[in-house]
Amino acid sequence: MTTIDATPDTGNKKDSPVNPRRRVYRPNTKYIPILATLALLVIMYSAGVANYENFGQPSVIVNLFRDNAVLLVVTVGMTFVILTGGIDLSVGAVISMTTTLTATLLQGGWPPLVVLVLVLLLGSLIGAGQGAVIHYFKVEPFIATLAGLFLARGIALFINQSSIPIRDETWKAISEYRIPLADGVVTKPVAIVAILAVLIAAAVLAWTRFGRNVYAIGGSADSALLMGLPVARTRIAVYTLSGFCAALGGVLFSINSTSGWALQGNGLELDAIAACVIGGVLLTGGSGYVFGALLGVLVTGLIQTIIIFQGDLNAAWTRIIVGVLLFAFIVLQRLVTRKVSR
């Protein structure tokens, strides 16, 4: 008879071989660009606090959001577009068209709420038209949105080539309203609208099917189509959203300046693209976050703030530094993409 000893081996673990390799925490590769942007923002802010008096005041941070509210809203829409692998060059022109049309209609006595709905609807329609042309006619996003740029800018110039003051009481009341945040610290409604836009967009990207479809199309539109995802609907919706954000940015612009002008928002599309890239949104699509784009906007805004505090630097340094950062982050994106593809 054979006896089997089923007692588990409880030998001393000290006698077992020990793995000589130590575990080292490495961040996920897709988070590296956004972590680099966050580190850059912290370094810039710390340097500002160390070198300039009153730079550490809460009002500096609050004003950063207030002064860049328009760019922040436009960058939210641009983030969705770039995540699908596209680009939208028309947003700056849509802003100018919106401000001009808003000022003209308010000057003509139109109700403010009707004007608001009308300009937001018009911006969304231009975006939807661009998305439809890009998807159904296989036109490159660069070309389709360039046509949208000329269309919107032309409409703005046709309406009026001069600056139009806004004297509507509702618009002026919103422009002059201040929201107290702390003792001596106030902000404007436009900053609250911009922050809400960021939070809503981040939630949509993270927790909705539409957000997952956006990432899937950016990863590979052909694969997304084979998986049965609604590529056409998602792509058109993304450009519609970008047009809506641009029109909303125009409304905020008109509230800030209480005027409309056909040359307002000139070049803002490039600032939005730069903010997305600095914030870690891959230009090839499929990777990036709205909060990264927010950090990109804050970095560009903080550069301007530091130059203002310095006092003796030309404003052109903002463009020079943003250009250098853009080169650096494009190279970083390239390195990250190459490492992931290995």
Image (cartoon, rainbow, N blue to C red):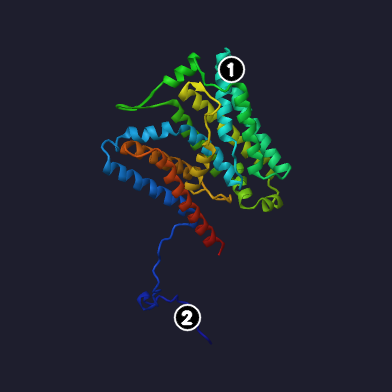
Percent from the top left, x then y, of residue 124? 62, 31
Number of numbered labels in the structure image: 2
Residue 76: where, in percent of width, then height? 53, 38
Density class for disc 1 (Cα within 10 Å; few <14, some 14-19, many ≥20) is some
Type of amino acid at the residue the image marks with label 2: Asp
Q: Residue at x 35, y 76 (%)?
A: 14
Which image quarter holds the C terminus? bottom right
Q: Mark 2 — residue?
A: 5
Q: Tell me if I can see residue 63 in this picture.
A: yes
Rendered image quadrant of residue 99: top right
Query: Where in the figure is residue 294, as x and y percent of width and height?
Result: 46, 41
- Compare marks 2 and 1 and give the one earlier in the sequence: 2
Q: Nearer the viewer, mark 2 or mark 1?
A: 1
Which label sits on residue 105? 1
Residue 33 sits above or below residue 245 on the image: below
The kind of residue on which mark 1 rests is Leu
The residue at the point 48 percent across, 36 percent down is 72
